[in-house]
Amino acid sequence: MTPRTPQFLGPDGVVGSHLREALSTGDGTRTIFLLFVLVGFGAFLGGLTRWALSVALKGAPGTWAANLIGSAVLGFSAAMPAMWPAFLGAGFGGAVSTLSTMAKEMGQMVEQKQWWPLLRYTTLTCVAGVIAAWYGLRVGLQLIPAF
């Protein structure tokens, strides 16, 4: 089970070193512009989803659900062909998940000396996040035909 997202190596063998070369052509500029649009639109949808979750589930449960959804979406996006990971993974998954809110909630638990809830919240978030990402990747690899 390996992700099928292509790795783009530049002429010197470094991931991402092709950016300058891509920008020098019209097609490369359009592709990079499209990536920005896809990430932005995905982030817009992810932000709306994050907001809806924070309204429906207040506090740590909403943050936990958002991070779980983000992990699953990121795993799923790793199985998708080029351009889709930008929209789904970086855009939607990045916007729906929230490390900063989780850190704030953990800090509040530390201030209130709620050690067991802190341990439970941290452990469940990390373990469930990895499982959700793995499951998302697995589902993605089964649903999306190899390219």
Image: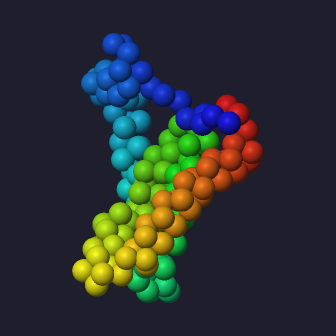
Name the side, left or right, on which 137 lies relative to 129: right
x and y percentages locating residue 144 in the rendered image: 70, 44
Q: Position of residue 140 (x, y in %)?
A: 67, 48
x 30%, y 81%: residue: 113
Is residue 79 placed above or below 38 in the rendered structure? above
Q: Nearer the viewer, residue 115 or 124?
A: 115
Q: How many marks?
A: 0
Q: Residue at x 36, y 70 (%)?
A: 102
Q: Is residue 71 above or below residue 142?
A: below
Identify the residue at the far top of this view. 12
Residue 101 shows in this picture:
no
Q: Position of residue 115 (x, y in %)?
A: 37, 76
Residue 134 appearing in the image: yes
> In the picture, which quadrant includes the C terminus?
top right
**Residue 91 location, x and y as percent?**
43, 55
Residue 30 sits in which quadrant? Answer: top left
Q: Which residue sits at x=59%, y=58%?
A: 132
In the rendered image, the quadrant that contains the N terminus is top right
Outermost residue toward the left in this view: 111
Q: Is residue 130 left or right of residue 90?
A: right
Q: Nearer the viewer, residue 71 or 92?
A: 71
**Residue at figure coordinates x 36%, y 47% from the top left:** 36
77 is higher (above) or lower (below) than 32: below
